[in-house]
Image (spheres, rainbow, N blue to C red):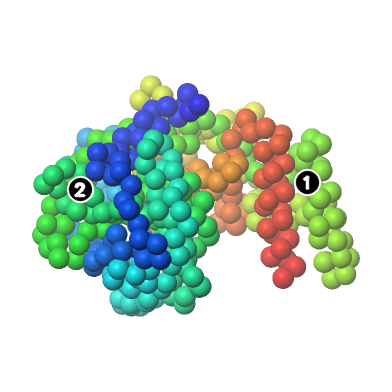
Amino acid sequence: MLPKKHIVYGAAVLLLAVFFTGCKSTSAAVKLEAGNELSAWKGEWQSFSAISGATQLNDAYRMQAEKMPYYTEDGLKAAVSKMFATPIVKAKFDGSNTVLFTVMDKDGNEKQIPCEYRYTGMKPMQGVEGHSWYAFEAIKPVQGLAEAQYFIIVPPHRDSEDSLLHWHARFGSRDIKSLVESDPLWWPTYADTAVSNENLLKEITDTIKEVAEMLPKAPLMPYTGKWVNTALIYDDPRPAVQEAYTKLIKEFSGKKDGSDFTKEEIIMIAKKSYGTASDFTHLEFITDNDKNEMVVWKGDTELSRVAYSRDGANKLRAMANAFVASDRQKAGKFAFLSMTTPHGSPAHMHVWYGMKPSEIEKTDGKKPTCIPADSSEELVAKRVLDTCRKLLKEATK
């Protein structure tokens, strides 16, 4: 069951999912040709991401943001742009399972790269009953397409009889599971390359209005509740956590230049990455009764309680959600935030902060992380085991 604190956010996510999938038009599965499963997408397609930030759309963003008390114009633009974000600018399907993708190189130039994929099955779409993704993985890694090693995709469809033919896909380098479970507001969208720039702008203008009406009124809604700084969990004395260290010491026995890691050394490595809780122990997000506040705690002491607005993405953390405090002086070093959407299992999020946008990487730890404060002993132990194992693998390469 969806936790009560997330019901409003969950409803907004569901509305957006139905909006993006086109509920009526994608309810039936397409028939795939064995060995040529991607033939259902045959054609040449362009991403909405390349145009979602066009200056011609500024008026549309401004008009909608004026109606949204907790979004700046740049914040709404960032929310919409993040929905469409994708490493694949264009895609050409020729009827086989080899796709010609267009990506942007480090100099901002388009580069075409072919890649052959294998179909791995259908994956249920989270939160949208009766809908599924079609999952594909590259036959082998291809240079320049690391971020498209895996992808999940829905068939071309129209949201109404006279609307634009389009489809959605998510691309990534990790695995299919992480794509299915990623940010539920992430809907990269593609239309035929024959569609004119003018028509694409009109389509996105309409989308901005519709999406703005469905976004949570409080952009901090996904974080609602109290979160604990994971710097604290590595000192957790409970048995399950202590057993995690026993497993790690045994697993990495002899891999520290011929000797074993101690528990204290493992904790030190973890805190170097995740911080020491010197700035905060807990963050609490309050989004009921028309609020959009973050409370910073140090133990039982409340350091600040300030309202925040969704802002334009910080270049230092371009893929994170950026927020700006309504009272920067009161917020202090938490005047500007960049936070990932809660993700993973157990659920966690990363948060960077600063008195100025340029200071968000001067936080305590390279990757300050929080998990729900009410996480069970087992989930805390799993988080300790998973993160420390990853760090020890990196340290013993």
Using residue 249 as the reference point, say whether residue 285 is left or right of it: left
Tell me where residue 32 appears, x and y as whole percent.
35, 57
Residue 290 falls in which quadrant of the image? top left
Residue occupying image coordinates x 30% and y 41%: 27
View extreme (front): residue: 34
Query: Which numbered dot is residue 115?
Result: none
Instruction: Give the structural element (helix, strand or loop) at label 2.
Output: loop
Residue on which disc 1 sits: 244
Query: Which numbered dot is residue 158?
Result: 2
Tell me where residue 133 appears, x and y as whole percent.
40, 49
Tell me where residue 5 appears, x and y as whole percent.
47, 26
The three-letter amino acid code for the residue at tag 1 is Ala
Which sits earlier in the primary sequence, circle 1 or circle 2?
2
Residue occupying image coordinates x 45% and y 29%: 6
Label 1: few (<14), some or many (≥20) within 10 Å?
many
Using residue 290 as the reference point, say whether residue 256 is left or right of it: right
